[in-house]
Image (cartoon, coloured by chain):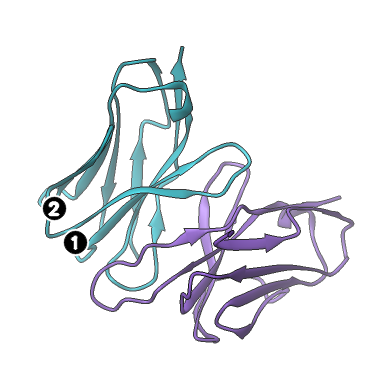
Chain colours: A purple, B cyan
């Protein structure tokens, strides 16, 4: 009955490799996100999709490419991994509300270590 | 964009005492203020939130207060327990789907 699930939970890979992280939500939400949490615990938004359309695209290297096949899935593909990409990546979802704030639900995180 | 500051960065309290974490925000248009708790090895989990049309909200041992004039909001945890030890994040949003997070507070409850 996991609400926002992402895989893999742990990923260790070498520099230069390409890797993907998958995310799925069963909350019926229409908006999904990728956040990055660095070693200092700072949470920063990377991307957001609403009904499969990209609505937020922060200043992220173009080696990072999100893909949303449907509104319940948002995957993150990373090309040519660098040491600085090591972090915890959180998938999240919510309903998009135009008037009042929307509650965002996070997955358990994917720990990426680039060696 | 919105800038959220969180103080203190680390807070140690004796079990049973109260803990208070304060956040300030910069954008007066922000109208939604959630608090998240992140335990070790897990994702942030929403524990309480408040919208700009109320000044205080309480849920058992947790309460949040909002001062729109001063642009700050606080999390209050009463009768702290060891399981309250975690990193707490405040955030602010102005009705779009963009949440600006503070840098987090490490709360340590000493048994």
CB within 8 Å, label 2 to label 1: yes
The reply to whether residue A58 is visible in this rendering is no
The reply to whether residue A109 is visible in this rendering is yes
> Could you say whether the residue bearing mark 1 is in a helix, strand or loop?
loop
> Could you say whether the residue bearing mark 2 is in a helix, strand or loop?
loop
Q: Position of residue B32 (x, y in %)?
A: 26, 60
Q: Are marks 2 and 1 on the same chain?
A: yes
Q: Which residue position is annotated with label 2?
A: B68
Q: Which of B27 and A55 lies nearest the eye of the viewer?
A: A55
For label 1, count other residues whose C-alpha is less than 10 Å away and answer few (under 14), some (14-19) or many (20+).
Answer: few
Q: Check the residue under mark 1 and report the chain it is in.
A: B
Above or below residue A66? Residue B64 is above
Say which residue appears at 55% left-offset and 44% top-offset: A41
User: Looking at the rendering, which quadrant does residue A6 occupy?
Assistant: bottom right
Looking at the image, residue B56 sits to the left or right of residue A69; the answer is: left
Above or below residue A84? Residue A70 is below
Q: Which residue position is annotated with label 1?
A: B28
Q: Position of residue B72 (x, y in %)?
A: 21, 46
Query: Which badge, 2 or 1, is on the more N-terminal residue?
Result: 1
> Outermost residue toward the front?
A1
Say which residue appears at 42% left-offset and 32% top-offset: B9
Q: Quadrant of the N terminus of chain B?
A: bottom left
Above or below residue A69? Residue B19 is above
Inter-mark Cα distance, 2 to 1: 8 Å
Q: Position of residue B94 (x, y in %)?
A: 27, 67
Looking at the image, residue B49 sits to the left or right of residue A94; the answer is: left
For label 2, count other residues whose C-alpha is less than 10 Å away and answer few (under 14), some (14-19) or many (20+).
Answer: some
Q: Which of A79 and B61 lies nearest the eye of the viewer?
A: B61
Residue B56 has which mark? none
Say which residue appears at 23% left-offset and 75% top-offset: A99
């Amino acid at each position: 009955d996991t609400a926002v699930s992402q895989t893999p939970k742990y990923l260790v890979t070498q520099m230069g490799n390409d890797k993907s992280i998958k995310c799925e939500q069963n909350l019926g939400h229409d908006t999904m996100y990728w956040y990055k949490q660095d070693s200092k615990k700072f949470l920063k938004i990377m991307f957001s999709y609403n009904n499969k359309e990209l609505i937020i695209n922060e200043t992220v290297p173009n080696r990072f490419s999100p893909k949303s096949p449907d509104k319940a899935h948002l995957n993150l593909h990373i090309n040519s991994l660098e040491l600085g990409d090591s972090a915890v990546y959180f998938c999240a979802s919510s309903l998009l509300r135009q008037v009042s704030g929307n509650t965002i639900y996070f997955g358990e995180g994917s720990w990426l270590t680039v060696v | 964009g919105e800038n959220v500051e969180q103080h203190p960065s680390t807070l140690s309290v004796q079990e049973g005492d109260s803990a208070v974490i304060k956040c300030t925000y910069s954008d007066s248009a922000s109208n939604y203020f959630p608090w998240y708790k992140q335990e070790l090895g897990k994702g942030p989990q929403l524990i309480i939130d408040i919208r700009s049309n109320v000044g205080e909200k309480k849920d058992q041992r947790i309460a949040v207060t909002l001062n729109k004039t001063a642009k700050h909001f606080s999390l209050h945890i009463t009768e702290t327990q060891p399981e309250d030890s975690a990193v707490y994040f405040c955030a602010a949003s102005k009705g779009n789907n963009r949440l600006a997070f503070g840098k987090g507070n490490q709360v340590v409850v000493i048994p």
